[in-house]
Image (cartoon, rainbow, N blue to C red):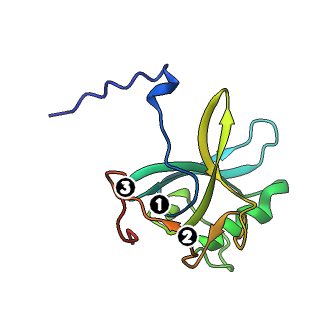
Amino acid sequence: MAKLNHTNYTDPSEFTHLPPGIYAVEVKAAEEKVGKTSGNAYFQVQFTTGGQFLCFDTLMLEGNGLNMGLAKLYALGIPRDCEEILAAELIGRTCWVSTKVDTFRDQEKLVVDIGAKDSKVGYFTEKPAGVIEAAADGGAEDTPF
C-alpha cells in the first residue's frame, strides 16, 4: 500500500532544511548532465545524512569548474588515475560536507560551502571536528557509516 504525500509544493513554508554545518553524507542519487549554455558535462548529486535529504551539489567534469569537480570526486573516493566514471558509480559513496544557507527565488536551501575552512571545496575525506550527526528522524546519532 502506498502512502500519500500531502505536502503543498507551492507553499514554501512547507519546506524546512537541516541547520547549516558539517555532515556525514551519502550520495543518494547522481545524474550526468550537460550545461545548457556552456555545453560542459557535470554530475548533479543528491546528498542524504542519516537517511534524510541534505542538499544537491554539482561536480563539474569539464570547463572552468573542472578542478573543483575533481577535488569533490577525490573526496568521494574516486581514484586520481580514474579516466572514466558513470554517475551510478557515485551512488552510495560517502564523505563529509560543510553546508551553508543560500537563498534562491526567495527560498532558503542548504548548499555545499565551497569556502569552508580546512575543506577541499566544502568536502572532507576524514571526519572533521564539529560534525552534526543527523538521525533519520532528525535527531542525533552516531555517524551513519
Question: SS for tag 3?
Answer: loop
Give the numbered dot on residue 24.
none
Q: Where does label 3 land, which residue?
A: 51
- Taking the spot 76% from the left edge, 63% from the top edge, the residue there is 68
Amino acid bearing label 3? Gly
**Residue of label 2:** 130
Name the amino acid, label 1.
Answer: Ile
Which residue ends up furthest to the right in the rendered image? 64
- Of mark 1 and mark 3, the one earlier in the sequence is 3
Q: Residue at x 33, y 54 (%)?
A: 136
Mark sitting earlier along the chain (2/3): 3
Q: Which residue is mark 1?
A: 91
Label 1 or label 2, whichever lies nearer to me, is 2
Observer-side mark, 1 or 3, equals 3
How far apart are the alpha carbons under marks 2 and 3? 20 Å
Query: Which is more toward the observer, 85 or 64?
Result: 64
Q: Quadrant of the C terminus?
A: bottom left
Q: CA distance from mark 1 to mark 2?
A: 25 Å
Left or right: residue 110 compared with residue 102: left
Residue that extends furthest to the left in the rendered view of this protein: 1
Q: Quadrant of residue 70?
A: bottom right
Q: Nearer the viewer, residue 17 or 51?
A: 17
- Image quarter in which the N terminus is found: top left
